Amino acid sequence: MSGNGNKRPPLVADRRHAAKPAPKPAPAKAAPRSRKARDARPRNPVVRFVTGVVGFFVRLVWGVTWRVTVVAGLAVLGASAFFASQMPPAADQVDGRARGSVTMQDRDGTVFAWRGEQFGGVI
């Protein structure tokens, strides 16, 4: 295709948003006060005493609680591992009798009832 000699400017989308202005420099922050400077301010001695006592007991309860929880968890884990190692194989635990898992006999040894699975297989 050949041009017809008509020079048109290229199609360009309109600017929908104005250019963002340059960000203003942040105002200089005051240096954070140190813990020593914060604690140096005068406080009510009753409030200091109450918050100190409450804080002490909260730290005490938290410290004891997580330690007791860890020890109890280790004890449960150890007991589970011990009893799991002492269990017989799963095949030995299945009752292979077809008449049921519980057989009831009278004093003479005569069977008078069965309880449990009667005709189905092992579940």
Image (tube, rainbow, N blue to C red):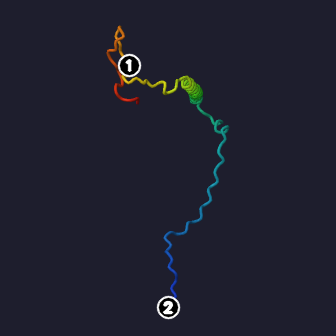
Between 36 and 114, the one lying in front of the other is 114
Q: Secondary structure at mark 2?
A: loop
Residue 33, percent from left and from top: 65, 43
| Residue at image coords 49%, 24% | 92
Between 66 and 23, the one lying in front of the other is 66
Q: Is residue 42 left or right of residue 91?
A: right
Quarter of the rendering containing residue 65: top right
| Residue at image coords 51%, 91% | 5
Residue 35, percent from left and from top: 66, 38
Check the image and report above or below for 109 versus 3: above
Q: Is residue 51 left or right of residue 40?
A: left
Between 47 and 6, the one lying in front of the other is 6
Mark with earlier residue (1, 2): 2
Q: Are marks 1 and 2 in contact (CB under 8 Å)?
A: no
Instruction: Give the Cα separation between the discs numbered 1 and 2.
Output: 104 Å
Residue for badge 1: 102
Residue 43, percent from left and from top: 60, 33
